Image (cartoon, rainbow, N blue to C red):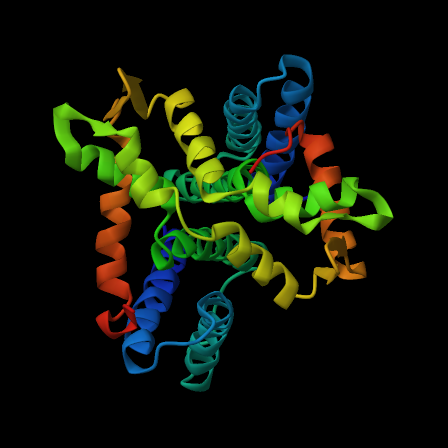
Amino acid sequence: MTSAWLLTLAPIAGLCADVIVQSACAHVLRRVGLSIVVGGLGGLAATAGILARVAFTVPAALDAAAAAMLVLTYLALAFGYWTFLNLNITSLRIRTLREILRGGEHGISRADLMARYSAQEFLRRRLERLELGGNLSCVDGRWRLASPKLLLLERSLARARALIIPAQREE
Amino acid sequence: MIELGTGILLLLCSLCAQVVLWRVSLPRRHTHALLVLFATLPLLIAGVAWAFGHPLATSPALAARIGLFYAAYALAYIVIYSAIENESPTLAIVALVAKAGPAGCADAELVERFGRGTAMAARFAVLERGGWVRTEGDRISLTAEGQSYARFFELAAQLFGIRLGG
């Protein structure tokens, strides 16, 4: 394989490394959050390793801008993988499908499903996740912001919404 | 440098085209429209450049590199767009708690604002409309298509070590 193609495929190799390392860590460490971070770093290391190898063997094939582009490409692919994992972790629709599948050929009861996933249950799960993630804290029955990260995200998305989606859509 | 510049320029063109198109005529299915726009615009630009006598002078490897960069960021944007399009209930909770300031927000207030409604029924209706589940009396079962997706996500969860989420 020429060095040009090796460089082009480096982000994809990084993504494969990300997936393999994340899966292995998730099974060994039994901590999905940590496995995602370790996987991401593993993929970045793999991408950087390929770039370094090409840079040492064929220096003319790689300049700083090309290296930056390839690393940025890997980061976008890793983000896509993280999104896929996050969807599996947080999506209620996916959870519902998996629960119905586990119910066998007779499925599950609709009444059970609606009772199990009431709006209050939704809220409870979200608050639990926010507290576990260090975003909110609950003291004496009152919820307070523990970290500004998600608030910054919320404000950024609101601004983007105002910029991109015309106001007449608001119902 | 030229590959990175080309990739960024293509992305900016697609984003600008989206903002303009959304103001002219907001599509019914945003994600579908974004996929079509981001897939066709670079091809259109390349075609116009070729028609005006400016063919892309680049090797297949470099063209693939630009394409991969563009596709990765286009897909990342489309994923982020779903969060832009629909306000996340989780982020809405965070915004409400933040608004309460140091005094905090009582549980009862959160329940009043977010603990009512028929969120599950709405999600279930989406699954039914999409042809993934069917209802027979009180029993809900998966269609053939629903089973394929459910098995895919079940396999992915086992492979990537993810517990039953939601």
How many numbered marks does the figure carry?
Answer: 0
Instruction: Looking at the picture, tell me which residue is in the foreground, A47 or B3.
Output: A47
Residue A19 quadrant: top right
Measuring 72% from the left and 55% from the top, which residue is drawn there?
B138
Answer whether residue B60 is visible to the viewer in this image. no
The image shows residue B160 at horizontal and vertical percentages of 67, 31
Instruction: Looking at the picture, tell me which residue is in the foreground, A80 or B138.
Output: B138
Residue closest to the far left: B102
The image shows residue B110 at horizontal and vertical percentages of 30, 37
Residue closest to the far bottom: B51
Instruction: Looking at the picture, tell me which residue is in the foreground, A152 or A38.
Output: A152
State the quadrant of the C terminus of chain B.
top right
Answer whether residue A144 is visible to the viewer in this image. yes
Measuring 43% from the left and 82% from the top, which residue is drawn there?
B48
Instruction: Looking at the picture, tell me which residue is in the foreground, A129 or A85.
Output: A129
The answer to whether residue A21 is left or right of residue A105 is left
Where is A167 relative to B2, above or below?
below
Where is B69 relative to B53, above or below?
above
Measuring 27% from the left and 16% from the top, which residue is drawn there?
A139
The answer to whether residue A169 is left or right of residue A23 is left
The answer to whether residue A28 is left or right of residue B26 is right
